[in-house]
Image (cartoon, rainbow, N blue to C red):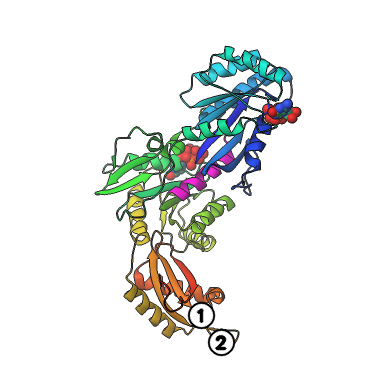
Amino acid sequence: MSVVAIVGRPNVGKSTLFNRICRRRQALVDDFPGVTRDRLTTSVEVEGRRFVLMDTGGFLSGDPTDFAEQTRRQVLLALDEADAIIFLADAKAGLHPGDEELVNILRRSDKPVFYAVNKVDGREQEIHAAEFFGLGTDRLYSVSAAHGYGVRELLEDVIAALPEEWADDPQDPDPPVRVSVVGRPNAGKSTLVNALLGEQRVIVSPVPGTTRDAVDTPLEWEGRRFVLIDTAGIRRKGKTREKLEKLSVIKALDSIDRSHVAVLMVDAVEGVTDQDLHIGGTIQERGRGCVIAVNKWDAFEKDLKRIRMFMQDLRDRFRFLPFAPILTISALKGKRVSRVLPSILEVFDQYNLRVNTGMVNRVLADALEKHEPPLVSGRRLKFYYATQPSTRPPTFVLFCNYPDRVHFSYQRFLTNQFREAFGMDKTPIRLLFRERARRGENRS
Ligand SMILES: Nc1nc2c(ncn2[C@@H]2O[C@H](COP(=O)(O)OP(=O)(O)OP(=O)(O)O)[C@@H](O)[C@H]2O)c(=O)[nH]1
Ligand SMILES: Nc1nc2c(ncn2[C@@H]2O[C@H](COP(=O)(O)OP(=O)(O)OP(=O)(O)O)[C@@H](O)[C@H]2O)c(=O)[nH]1
């Protein structure tokens, strides 16, 4: 997901603009538990485009003579993290030497920057705004964040400058395997990505010129095509040392969304944390394939009893991802890194499976026979037939008389039967229950 940052001197109206953009739009990502507060970031949708909006203001503290330096740091940070930048100045206050300094920094960047003068909501301000032409920027937007004037026009241009969004072609029978590598800070994501790219038989394709592709890395292994999602984001170690924790969480969620298979990296030394479970929960929720890579295995004390306990605990805590293969690796030492791609492929091939309707119904009939559906309010739950309308992940529709009342445990039973019969033990699958179509209606 692209990031748009609003920068500018204190009091120019950054928060007001931020709120105006968020106000009418539904904020999609709220606070995550366990994530420290950093710059105000929120995911918004404007004109059908989803992006992360970042307000760099409101963090100045202490000595006002420090403001200039603090603002400068925020701008550098924004340049690091954002895909597009809105620079805001204040027409009421007029042109300030601080504005010029920031503009000079922004000019040196190759990211799209939109220069806007805020508080243009009176004749006097209009005249004031003219001063800003002295900054020599190509285009200057006049806006009033408080009243909304000019904001739409500004946003339209910002959105047009954002990198292309990715979408999987549902018709492509043989798409490259899209892989995200996610996990807590310091779990070893960039070490693993570097190790994978350095693998002898991995061919890293030359990166085509588009912005989006420069962020992801296409590669080939054993004649199969992969794309590592957001490799640039993983490998880039922020020039500015501060970490935008919330932003990295939003980005991780976005990478999961864009992938078929997520490699969830867990730090063996630290053990499983709530944040790991939170990320794992998202993978499950979004119906993505998953490989759990327990990293830093070299530093884990090799005591059989401890290993057994660790593994049991891991399985137990990730019990909502029963289909995820677990690998113990050392990204640093290269131990078992060569197992990662094959494991991803195994998951992906199952993730992609299609079963014909005859087979689905035979397996359903067997399951019903093995374990009769329970009664619902004294009446028999009846299943009529089933189909698999889609895949990635394999999704089955089961027609029955009480679709809303299929007990969770029976759903789980059917899920397990399907997994076993169709060889789908390593992929998430979805079962949807629908009322039987009436005669004459389209059954699919
Ligand atoms: N007249 C007018 N005032 C505005 C406009 N936008 C913001 N303001 C006012 O400007 C002041 C500062 O606005 P903020 O949004 O807090 O500014 P900021 O840039 O986020 O400030 P920091 O958090 O200190 O960096 C507030 O009093 C706003 O009401 C506008 O379009 N017109
Ligand atoms: N002992 C050991 N250390 C490792 C291993 N993999 C990574 N590390 C170390 O763990 C630290 C973090 O590794 P990174 O690859 O930067 O982790 P990351 O997940 O990309 O970190 P963030 O950028 O903070 O999200 C580094 O000091 C690595 O050298 C491993 O397999 N074993």
Q: As drawn, is 344 to the left or to the right of 306?
A: left
Query: Magenta region: which residues?
Result: 242-258
State yes or no: residue 20 in magenta: no
Question: Please, is residue 385 above or below residue 285 in the view?
Answer: below
Q: Is ligand 2 within 8 Å of the beta carbon of the residue shown at mark 1?
A: no
Tell me the mark number nearer the camera, choosing from 1 and 2.
1
| Disc 2: which residue | 379
Check if mark 1's residue and mark 2's residue have beta carbons within 8 Å: yes
Q: Can the viewer see residue 84 in this picture?
A: yes
Q: Amino acid at mark 2?
A: Arg
Residue occupying image coordinates x 33% and y 41%: 218
State yes or no: residue 249 in magenta: yes
| Disc 1: which residue | 401
Q: Secondary structure at mark 1?
A: loop
Name the magenta segment's main secondary structure.
helix
Mark 1 vs mark 2, CA separation in Å = 10 Å
Question: Please, is residue 77 above or below residue 178 in the view?
Answer: above
